[in-house]
Every structure is written in C-alpha cells, then in structure tokens.
Amino acid sequence: MTVTPETGRWEALAAARTRADVGEGIASVLALLGIPDLISFAGGFPDPKTFPRERMSALLQEFAAAGEVSAFQYAPTGGLAGPRDALADRLERLQGRRPADDELLITSGGIEALELVTKSYLDPGDVVVVEAPTYLGAIQAFRSFEAKLVAVSMDQDGLEVDELEHLLAAGLRPKLLYSIPDHQNPAGVSLSGERRAPLVELARRYGFLIVEDVAYRELGFAADTFPSLWSLAPDVVVQAGTTSKTMFPGIRLGWAVGPPDIAARLVSTKQNTDQCAGALGQRLFEESARRGWLDEQVALSRALYERKAARLLAALERSMPEGAHWTRPQGGFFSWLTLPDGADSVDLAQRAVEQGVGIVPGTLFFPDGRGANTVRLSFSLVDEALIDDGIARLGALL
Ligand SMILES: Cc1ncc(COP(=O)(O)O)c(C=O)c1O
C-alpha cells in the first residue's frame, strides 16, 4: 500500500500526546488562511520591509573574505562566546540587568526556549498557568508534554494577578506560570507596572517558576517600558526571548536567561534536541548588535508598526458595529477584537475568507474553549494600503 497523507496509514502509530487537535471549525479556517490574495490579519509574521537584506549580504561576504570559521562550524550548546557577550550587553542596556555567564543560553528561537523549559520541568499532569488568551505555540508546547493548563483572565492591564492570588490561596499549585507581559500575543495589552512586583512575589511565596516571554518587548511604540519580570526577580523567572520580530525569523535565534541551575538544565536538555543554535545566525546577530544595526532596524520597525496599528484602529472605529470593542496596542503586532454578544468568530472567519479577508478566531488562543466571540487581528504583515478595505469588509459582514 502506498503511504499518502490521505491514507493516514501511520496515524495509528502516532504518540497520543501528538493527537490533541484544534477542532474541525478552526482547522478548516486555518486551512483557508493559506489562499493567495487574502487581505490577511491572520499571521503574526514581521513585515519583510524590515528585513536587513543588504547588511546581511555584506556580513556574509565579510565572513567569507576574512576566512572566518566559527560562523560555519558547530557551536557550543550554550552559544558562541561573542554572541553571548553581545546578547548580555544588550540585555543589560535594555533591561537594566546583565545575566551572569551561567544564567544565559542561546536558543533556536523563542519557541525552543519554551520547549526546553517544558521538556526539562514538566511531567504529565503538572499544572501550568497561562494567560487567557495566550500564544498558541506555548499552548501546544505545554500540551505536547501533557501538562494541565489553567487559564487566568486578563484585562486592559494584562494578567489579573488578583484572580491568580485567589486561585493559589484556594489550593492551586502550578509548577510554571507562562506570561507575555509586553504587547501580548494575542491580546495586544501589557502587564501594568503595578502588577509586576506582586506577581513575582506570588512565585516566591508559592514556589512556582515564571516563564516570561518577551517576544514583542522591544517593539513598543513609545520608548518607555516596564521592568521585565526577570530583571525584577532573576531568582524565580526564566525569560524566553527571540530575534524573530526584531531582526528576522529566518535565523531562528533566541535566548533563555534564568537561575543558574535552570540554565544548566536547559543546556543539558538542548544537547539532545538540536545540540546548538545555528552559528551563522549567532554571528549575524552579534555583528548586527555590535554595529548598532539592530537598534536602527528596531527603530524603523517600531515606526512602521505604529503607523499600521493606528490605521487599523481608525478603520475599526469607522467600520465596527455597536457592541464591538478592541484593544489599543502600544506596541507589538496585535489588537484583540471582541464581537457583539452572540457573534461567532469561527463562523465570521469562514465568511470573511469568502470576502477575501483572513482573521483568526479567538477560541484558538484559549486552552479551555472560551472566547467564541473574539478575534485576533494582526497588523504586522498586512499591506498598509489594504487595511481600510479589509476592515470595511469585515464590518459589512457584522
Ligand atoms: C509570544 C511569542 N513567543 C514566541 C514566538 C516564537 O518566536 P520564535 O520565532 O523565535 O520561535 C512567537 C512568534 O509568533 C510569539 O508570538
């Protein structure tokens, strides 16, 4: 018998933990989002206009001309010394704390940092607290290690730390808490400054580890930022970072910083995942950071995304019906739309595709089936000139 995806011959052999599925409605919407010529508010991809093509090309030529070996060779599991140092410098400058050498490792993207934490710390049935809603990739990572997910609500100021405190007081005992405190994916809000210290205090009191995902932290539209959770409490926080949104995702480069015993365990876990992050990407990052190119790129990206966000918000203002409301992002890639009562976002997404518009139903971002009337709108990749038209079509459907 020929094995094709249609016959599904190997399905019966798949590990049970890989079979968790997203539901038929959502799967059919996701399948439709790939069609060409869609005005797509769906993916969380960076705008290719921000990619530093010429500079990367110049660096590759430099490496070759200099006879460089390290960019082309295997790297130590925790990362090459130069890129580690450039990253530590950057974290010190942007977050006010320099990780010690034994607190840091370079990963193959932010998602690998999450994967290493889950693989190293979760047994089946362990409790992980997540924000409601949260990043789909994290839900999948935690699920693939058979964790039990508990979703705690968010409001305009991010995770509702009071609600978390009540749950803990009532006996909830998570091993991990996963948070995206800055310009959250998908909600487009940030954890307020006032909630940050109480959150890390809860981690100390109840003995859980906070996994802080800072994927969008550097992409705030204004210069001011709240202190990172890791800088507030390096004893109870492991931070997962990425260069995917600031530099470009093609190098799959990120980091994890945390308490030394955790960093050591992650390095040892990484030895039997991919052994090391690609050295070429590490060297491109190091040179871009050292030469100030990355800062320049981030400044241009912030301005571009701020303009796109403003255009999206103005279009929503014009086109959404009464009873709809949405978040007003101060950075990142997303706004979170809540539809009037009774609206069904899976149905809306299907009808939107027929009108040439891509959106992602919000239920996907909850581990517990909530969010039937919510939608994630991404403004990062959509062509600026098409935003008004796309939102007008969506408004007409509502
Ligand atoms: C919150 C969040 N964390 C991590 C990632 C993944 O980053 P990377 O491309 O570095 O794996 C993303 C990408 O969409 C994200 O939105």
Image (cartoon, helix red, strand yellow):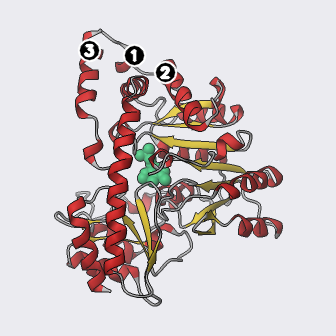
- Per the image, the residue denoted by label 2 is 80
* Side of 170 where 228 appears, left or right: left
Rendered view: 20 above or below 381: below
Point out residue 21 in the picture as x, y percentages from the top left corner: 45, 68
Rendered view: 151 above or below 281: below
Secondary structure at numbered mark 2: loop
Rendered view: 122 above or below 274: below
Q: Are marks 1 and 2 in contact (CB under 8 Å)?
A: yes
Image quarter for residue 173?
bottom right
Residue drawn at (47%, 89%) of the image: 341
Secondary structure at numbered mark 1: helix
Amino acid at dot 2? Leu
Dot 1 or dot 2: first in sequence order is 1
Amino acid at dot 3? Ala
Amino acid at dot 1? Ser
Q: Residues within 10 Å of mark 1 (few under 14, many from 20)?
A: some
- Per the image, the residue denoted by label 1 is 70
Residue drawn at (70%, 43%) of the image: 232
- CA gap, disc 3 to disc 2? 18 Å
- Per the image, the residue denoted by label 3 is 64
Q: Dividing the image into 4 quarters, which one contains the C terminus? A: bottom left
**Looking at the image, which is closer to me, 389 or 6?**
389
Dot 3 or dot 2: first in sequence order is 3
Asked if one can make out residue 45 in the rendered structure from this viewpoint, the answer is no
Dot 3 or dot 1: first in sequence order is 3
Q: Residues within 10 Å of mark 2 (few under 14, many from 20)?
A: many
Q: Residues within 10 Å of mark 3 (few under 14, many from 20)?
A: few
**Looking at the image, which is closer to me, 136 or 140?**
136
Rendered view: 269 above or below 149: above
* Side of 288 where 212 appears, left or right: right
